Amino acid sequence: MKLFFITGSKHKFREAERILKEYNVIIGRKDVECEEIRAENCENVALDCLRQLRSEVNEPFFIEDSGLFIKALNGFPGTFSSWVFKKIGNEGILELMRGKEVRDACFVSSIAAWDGKEEAVLRGEVKGYISNKISKEKGFGYDPIFIPEGSRKTFAEDHKTKMMCSHRRRALEKLAKWLRR
Ligand code: ITT
């Protein structure tokens, strides 16, 4: 079955392509816009988006809504992560976090999928911390400021670890399992 990942993000697509290949799931990319609703959690955003796109996309597909939830900021930027990143970036987040001792954060990935018959919502998350500075290594989005639990390096500094334990991997593994059901 050919499965499409509908996303405007090449980075998200590349990661998903690599991870799903391990499960013999081959994906293609399509970039079709959907209007993201305001919601407290990524699952609702992803499911609403899936339902909007079902009338436009005829093949099996999935979409993903991800977000960074920072404890000391009451979950901000959460479902607004994409917009906030464009507006204030990692510099802005570190500015908001200045002087905060509790640096816990959680990256969430919510996938909404349609296999031609049924729909499903699959969630993955990884707990961690917001670093004190932006790491210089490559990595997209919030990768240069997110340190996963049990590590001292950001996702940008240690991409190998990211590919093993990320929010995206955890949601994609559930997707692969659901497709095989
Ligand atoms: P689509 O909605 O078109 O898929 P997007 O980039 O808008 O692409 P999201 O709304 O899911 O995707 O992403 C929310 C933000 O979180 C966005 O700014 C990303 O850069 C960031 N983000 C998502 N996953 C990330 C990851 O694995 N590492 C670092 N930042 C990530």
Image (tube, rainbow, N blue to C red):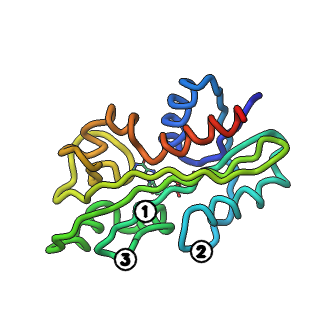
Residue position for label 3: 74
Q: Residue at x 51, y 34 (%)?
A: 14
Residue position for label 2: 38
Mark 2 packing: few (<14 Cα in 10 Å), some, or many (20+)?
A: few
Quarter-of-image position of residue 98: bottom left
Q: Mark 2 or mark 3: name the one nearer the start of the chain.
A: 2
Q: Residue at x 45, y 67 (%)?
A: 78
Amino acid type indicated by mark 2: Arg
Residue position for label 1: 86
Amino acid type indicated by mark 3: Asn
Counting from the top left corner in percent of width and height, residue 66 is at 50, 56
Q: Residue furthest front?
A: 181
- Helix, strand or loop at disc 3? loop
Image quadrant occupied by the C terminus: top right
Residue 170, placed above or below residue 17: below
Counting from the top left corner in percent of width and height, residue 38 is at 59, 74
Disc 2 and disc 1: Cα gap in Å?
A: 17 Å
Confirm or reject: label 1 Cβ below 8 Å from ligand 1.
Answer: yes
Disc 2 and disc 3: Cα gap in Å?
A: 16 Å
- Helix, strand or loop at disc 1? helix
